[in-house]
Image (cartoon, rainbow, N blue to C red):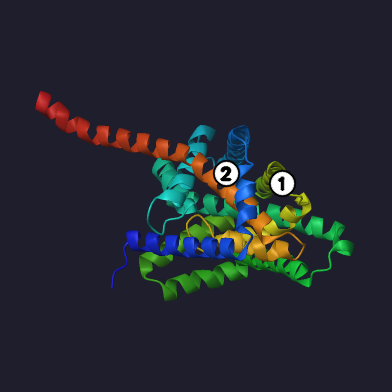
């Protein structure tokens, strides 16, 4: 039975809706409503400006990876790819995530599928590395006051996960084994494509300076994201130490990568409720913070929708222009 994109969308929407309704039901609903009603309009506008700046920094990080391969793409173009990816991830049916959309948009621009896929992957991966570095640093400084084995366990699990992935990406022996694996398990064309993308990622072992720069950018960006959640808590009048956002964001980010919900909605909130319960934050309060950030960012992604619509209109005009010229002639 063939499963179309629309069916996938409805399944993901059902998962997100079920989890959010469940969490709201398990929380103090009146408290959640009270928190939402306290958000002033100016805070929403400032949040849009703040998050757009973070996306601009992320686009520059992506540009660094491309420049290392002598591929030059204007920052405004990469920023538009980010915004369109946000929109499609939140609104359109299908199993296509924001990273896949960014990869496709970049491929159409530079006509190099290997560079497109590898740089999008490394841009996301460097973000996780930067996030984990600050998370481990936070855990180190607060270890004496952290009495939750669950928190320590999830942070260390993320570290182990990233180390294993790094070995798989840049170990010559693993790369050789992966090459043989691709050729045996997948059809010839798919195996060759996967090997080419892996080789493109593997080649960045010669660009240590660029990789170090992207990690530094990632640390800055992830600190800004943690501060973003901290500011949301402040606006809502909820007392949450920003240290906990730094500590928990790596595992929350990894969990929301699982493509079973709309933009991570529901999955992210469930993870946040479970983790923040370990440090004494009520489910109603952390749910209010997470949902307010999500809906503000979703509204911001409409900008990406406008870019996408304008782009489609340009493409249609370009496709129609030859036939129109023929009629006129």
Residue under the image location 52 percent in, 62 percent down: 21
Q: Position of residue 47 (x, y in %)?
A: 61, 38
The quarter of the rendered structure image containing the N terminus is bottom left
Give the number of the disc on residue 35: none
Secondary structure at numbered mark 1:
helix
Are there few (<14), some (14-19), or many (20+) residues within 10 Å of tag 1? many
Closer mark to the observer between disc 1 and disc 2: 1
Percent of width and height locating residue 228: 67, 44
Q: Is residue 320 left or right of residue 310?
A: left
Pointers 1 and 2 in contact (C-beta within 8 Å): no
Q: Earlier in the sequence, mark 1 or mark 2?
A: 2
- What is the crowding at mark 2: few (fewer than 14 residues within 10 Å), some, or many (at least 20)? many
Q: CA distance from mark 1 to mark 2?
A: 26 Å
Residue 62: which disc? 2
**Residue at the limit of the structure toward the bottom, as seen here:** 184
**Rendered position, 117 above or below 213:** below
Residue that numbered label 1 is attached to: 230
Q: Is residue 4 left or right of residue 85?
A: left
Specify the quadrant of the image occupied by residue 52: top right
Quadrant of the image containing the C terminus: top left
**Residue at horizontal 55%, vertical 44%?**
297
> Which is more toward the observer, 171 or 92?
92
* 272 vs 77, nearest the viewer: 272
What percent of the width, then of the height, locates residue 249? 67, 56
Q: Which residue lies at the image location 51% right of the left edge and 33% below the top edge? A: 76
Check the image and report above or below for 232 versus 153. above
Residue 144 location in percent, x, y? 89, 63
Q: Is residue 317 left or right of residue 216?
A: left
Q: Nearer the viewer, residue 115 or 46?
A: 46
Quarter of the view holding residue 308:
top left
């Amino acid at each position: 039975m063939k499963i179309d994109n629309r069916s996938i969308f409805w399944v993901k929407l059902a998962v997100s809706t079920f989890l959010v309704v469940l969490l709201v039901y398990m929380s103090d609903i009146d408290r959640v409503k009270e928190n939402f009603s306290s958000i002033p309009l100016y805070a929403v506008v400032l949040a849009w400006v703040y998050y757009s700046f973070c996306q601009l920094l992320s686009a520059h990080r992506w540009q660094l990876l491309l420049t290392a391969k002598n591929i030059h793409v204007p920052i405004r173009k990469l920023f538009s790819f980010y915004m369109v990816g946000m929109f499609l991830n939140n609104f359109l049916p299908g199993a296509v995530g924001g990273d896949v959309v960014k990869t496709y948009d970049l491929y159409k621009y530079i006509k190099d599928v290997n560079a497109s896929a590898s740089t999008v992957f490394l841009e996301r991966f460097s973000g996780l590395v930067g996030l984990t570095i600050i998370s481990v640093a936070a855990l180190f400084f607060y270890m004496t006051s952290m009495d939750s084995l669950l928190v320590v366990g999830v942070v260390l699990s993320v570290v182990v996960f990233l180390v294993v992935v790094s070995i798989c990406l840049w170990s010559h022996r693993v790369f050789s084994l992966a090459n043989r694996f691709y050729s045996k398990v997948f059809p010839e064309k798919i195996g060759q494509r996967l090997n080419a993308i892996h080789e493109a990622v593997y080649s960045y072992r010669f660009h240590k300076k660029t990789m170090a720069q992207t990690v530094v950018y990632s640390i800055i960006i992830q600190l800004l994201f943690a501060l973003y959640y901290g500011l949301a808590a402040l606006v809502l009048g909820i007392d949450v130490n920003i240290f906990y956002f730094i500590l928990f964001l790596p595992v929350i980010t990894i969990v929301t990568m699982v493509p079973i919900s709309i933009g991570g909605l529901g999955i992210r909130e469930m993870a946040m409720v479970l983790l923040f319960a370990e440090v004494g934050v009520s489910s109603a309060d952390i749910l209010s913070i997470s949902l307010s950030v999500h809906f503000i960012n979703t509204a911001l992604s409409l900008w990406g929708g406008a870019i996408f619509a304008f782009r489609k209109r340009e493409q249609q005009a370009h496709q129609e222009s030859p036939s129109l010229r023929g009629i006129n002639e």
